[in-house]
Amino acid sequence: MNSAPLMAIRGLEVTFGTSRVVHGIDLDIAAGEALGVVGESGCGKSVTWLAALGLLPGMAATSGSVRFQGQELCNAPRATLENVRGRRIAMIFQDPSSCLNPVRRVGPQLVEAVTLHTNLRGDEAKTEVLRLMELVGIPDRAARFNLYPHEFSGGQSQRLMIAMALAGRPDILVADEPTTALDATIQAQILDLLGRLRRETGMALIFISHDLGAVSQVCDRIAVMYAGRVVETGAVTEIFAHPRHPYTVGLLNSIPRLDGGQDDLLTIPGAVPDPSHLPPGCAFAARCARADETCATAIPPLRGDGAAVACWHAALPNPSLREAALA
Ligand SMILES: Nc1ncnc2c1ncn2[C@@H]1O[C@H](COP(=O)(O)OP(=O)(O)OP(=O)(O)O)[C@@H](O)[C@H]1O
């Protein structure tokens, strides 16, 4: 990355009581890029981004650094976080009801979001809401302005939530499993929409999903997470063509292919370890056919520039790095 990143996460750790669930995440987000964060359930995808935005409950302890446009967000004062959230960085979730009040008409709720995050008021705010409804593909928007959330289908509700997230014209949209609850056709439409919005608005997109296939449709780059760590990062095309971490290979083997050229979908044996009882070495070792003594005893660091991998057996541009890292 040539210019300074829009967001730089360094050494981010999250602990709930005695259980550390995020173990030192380092990630850069460039302006306008789409980064997919993938991994099985429980590997720390959501917690990482909730921590970065200061949205975890008080019992969570967060440390490290999250710099957004040079401003530190990790453990920042509430006023700083409230100024950034919604306005500069917005987040959407799987369930639209988390952001839409079921007993209020949607138009006024969107106007409220626009008023909260911009200087627009009155008719100007309403015009902006109608623009946002058009942007996210809500047909007949003037009539729908006065409907209640339950009068919209699942896919349309998802579009409304995206419109609400765009109210502050954010620099980063964090989308946490936004299509998981939708059927395949609607899922494809929402993925298309996110890709188009990213291109049209120039915002960066963080797309969190357990579905590597969905992520590959909208993202330029992927960060694969396992047991609270990033285990591989790289361009989508590179990761699909040359996955280096055995876990990434497992995730790729479990994606159904449209051409049907795959006889069996392979599942990864075993399960994600309990974060409070991680093994001393590589957390994936117990599920990995290539694991040896080193893997069982030493945690592989994430190595590489741009494309990076945390595996003692992954091919490295310079093999002496393995020796150096083990020394
Ligand atoms: N409020 C909480 N209190 C205690 N532990 C939590 C809390 N929230 C999350 N965790 C734990 O943190 C770990 C990471 O959870 P996280 O939700 O980030 O996983 P994920 O990869 O996003 O999974 P999913 O795809 O299921 O959302 C899990 O072990 C989870 O049980």
Image (cartoon, rainbow, N blue to C red):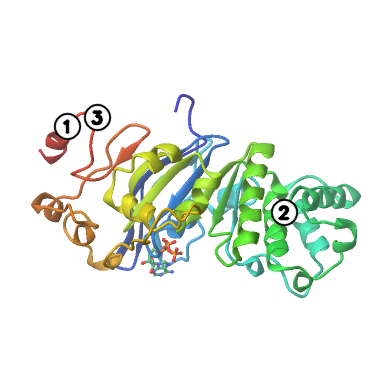
Quadrant of the rendered image containing residue 185: bottom right
Task: Kindly identify which numbered label has been placed on residue 319.
Answer: 1
Q: Residue visible at 36% across and 62% down?
A: 264
- Pointer 3 or 2: first along the chain: 2
- Image quarter for ligand 1 equals bottom left
Q: Above or below — where is 178 with respect to 31?
A: below
| Mark closer to the observer (3, 2) | 3
What secondary structure is found at the residue carrying circle 3?
Answer: loop
Residue 283 in the image, given as x and y percentages of width and height: 23, 57
The amino acid sitting under disc 1 is Pro
Element type where label 2 sits in the image: helix
**What residue would you read off at disc 3?**
317
Q: Distance between the residues labelled 1 and 3?
A: 6 Å
- Look at the image and tell me in which quarter the N terminus lies: top left
Q: Pick whichever of labels 2 and 1 is earlier in the sequence.
A: 2
Residue type at mark 2 is Ala
At x 79% / y 44%, what residue is drawn?
A: 119
Q: Is mark 1 on a helix, strand or loop?
A: loop
Q: Is residue 323 left or right of residue 191?
A: left
Identify the amino acid type marked 3.
Pro
Q: Residues within 10 Å of mark 2 (few under 14, many from 20)?
A: many
Q: Mark 2 points at which residue?
A: 163
Task: Tell me the residue at 85%/63% (across/down).
Answer: 144
Instruction: Give the image location of residue 300, x and y in percent.
Output: 21, 46
Q: Which residue is drawn at 58% across and 59% down?
A: 178
